Amino acid sequence: MKKIIILTFINVVVITLSFAQTFPSWQLYLMDNWQDTTLTPSWQYDNTYNEIWGVQINGVEIAIIGSTAGTHFFDVTIPSGVNQVDFVAGAYTGSGVIHRDYHDYNGYLYAVCDEGNNSTLQIIDMTNLPNSVSVVYDSNLLFTKSHNIFIDTATAKLYVCAVKHTNPNNFSSAMEIYSLADPLNPSLLYTYNDVGHVHDAYVRNDTAYLNCGNDGFRIVDFHYLDLTGGMAPIELASLTSYPDAGYNHSGWLNNDGTVYAMLDENHGYDIKLLDVSNFNNITILSTFNSGINPNSMAHNAIIKHNLLFVSYYHDGLRVFNIADPTNPFETLYYDTYLPNNHSSYKGAWGVYPFWNKQNHTFSSILVSDMQTGLYVFSGSFPLSINDLEKEPNSIFPNPATNGFNTTNKDATNIILYDIFGKKVLDKNLPNNKVSRRNIANGLYFYNLKNKQEIIENGKIIFE
C-alpha cells in the first residue's frame, strides 16, 4: 500500500480525578490527537471518522481507525509519537460513508462498510506491520454491506451483523456466520434470521450475545454448526423487557463470563449491567450513565478486567469501575467533543484499550471521535476496587519535585524515558532512592529492573 504522511501534533494533557477520602488520585494523559482536515465528512452526521480497533503485532501496538476514505494504520507503541504507517482505501468512499467496522484474526484485519453498493469485505494482511499492510481479499461475492462484525477467535468464525446483498437477489439477513478455517476464503456456515435484526454481537466459544436493536437481547449457542448435518443453533436466553429498553445497540462480556454490559442507543437511556451467569435467570444488576446531560447517549464499550471503557458520543471517553457490578462508578473521563448539543449523533464513536500484560495496567487507550479523529491516551490506574486501596506502582511521591523513592524491594536499577522514547536516566538504586539531577519538568516512563529482567513499569511526573 502507498504510505501517506500526515502531520500529527503532540498534546499532552493531564486529567486528574479524585475519589472519596479512602482513594488516591489517578491520572490519565492525552498523548496525541490525529485528524486529517482534507478528508470529506459524511453528509448525514458530519462524521469523518468511525470505528477504532487495535492490534499488537511484531512487538508494536497498532491503532486502526476508519474514515470516509478508508482504513488508517498508526504505530502507537510510543503513544506520544503517533505515526501513520499505512492506509487502505475503502471500496466505497466519500460523503456517503458513515459506518465501518473491524476485527482481526490470525494476522489479518477484516473490514466492512454499511454504505454504498460496492462496500465489499476487505481482508488486509497485517503481518508486515509496522512497515506496511496489503489487501489480500476485496470482493462483494459473499455480501455487499454489513453494519458490524465480530470474530470468535477460539472457533475461527466470523459473525456478520445486519447483512445486505446486491447479488444475486438483493436480500438481507439479520446475521450470517462464516468459517475462517481458511482465513482468506471465508465460507458461509449459517444464515441466522430468528430475529428481525442483529445490530452487533459478542461471541465467545460459540456462545453469541446478540444486540438485536428493537428486538432486545439474545444469547444463542452456535457450536452445532461444527457438526455434520447442519443442526440449527439453540437460543439459550432472551431479554426484551428491561429498564430503559430501546434500540439495543452493543455490548461486551466480562472476563469470567458472568456480567454483560449492554448499551441501548437512545438519548438519555442508561447503560445496563446484566447478570448472565445463569441463562435461565438473566437479571439487571445496575443501570447508570455519565451524569452529564439528560440526553446523553452511550455508543460502544469494551470491558478489560474490572473496567468498562465507554465511547459516550458527546460526552467522550468514560471509564467505569465495575468490580462490584451492583455499584459501578466513574473513574476517569475525557471529553473529545466540546459542543454541548446532545440532540444528534456526534462525538466519541469507539474505544479500544491496550494493556501491558506484564504488570496488568493499561499502556494506552484509543478513542475515535466522529468529528475530531484519533485520540491516544496513556496512564496507569486501578483495575479493581481492591487495587484502589494502594498506589498503582511503587514510585512515590508522584508527581515528584526533588526526587523519588520506590517501595519495590526487588528493584536494583531504574531506567527513565521521556515522552519521545529517549533514555534520560539509567542507574542503580542505592537504598531505593533517586535524586533528581538535570531532569526537566514533564511526564516520563520508567522501568524498574532486578538483575535479570524488568519487574515494574509505569509513569512519573516531575514538577
Image: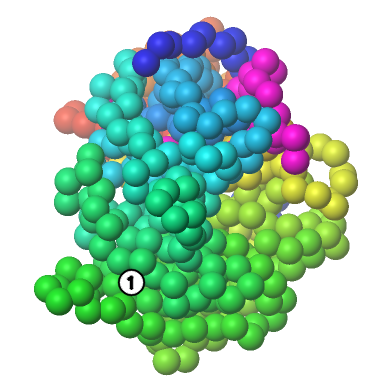
Indicate the position of residue 28 as horizontal and vertical percent values.
60, 38
Indicate the position of residue 434 as horizontal and vertical percent values.
45, 23
Which image quarter holds the N terminus? top left
Indicate the position of residue 54 as horizontal and vertical percent values.
42, 38
Q: Is residue 277 above or below residue 154?
A: below
Nearer the observer, 428 or 81: 81
Residue 256 shown left or right of residue 211 in the figure: left
Residue in view at x 85 percent, y 62 percent: 294
Nearer the observer, 132 or 121: 121
Majority secondary structure of magenta residues:
loop
Indicate the position of residue 346 as horizontal and vertical percent values.
74, 43
Question: Does the magenta-highlighted stretch encompass residue 54?
Answer: yes
Q: Is residue 201 visible?
A: no
Nearer the observer, 453 or 211: 211
Disc 1 packing (10 Å; few <14; some 14–19; many ≥20): some
Residue in view at x 49 percent, y 60 percent: 172
Nearer the observer, 342 or 389: 342
Residue 166 shown left or right of residue 26 in the figure: left
Segment colored magenta: 34-59
Residue in view at x 69 percent, y 72 percent: 246
Q: Is residue 263 above or below residue 99?
A: below
Which image quarter holds the C terminus? top right
Badge 1 amino acid:
Thr
Name the residue beneath numbered marker 1: 207
Q: Residue furthest left?
A: 228
Tag 1, which secondary structure?
Answer: strand
Question: Does the magenta-highlighted stretch encompass residue 50?
Answer: yes
Q: Is residue 2 visible?
A: yes
Q: Is residue 412 above or below residue 365?
A: above
Residue 11 shown left or right of residue 431 in the figure: right
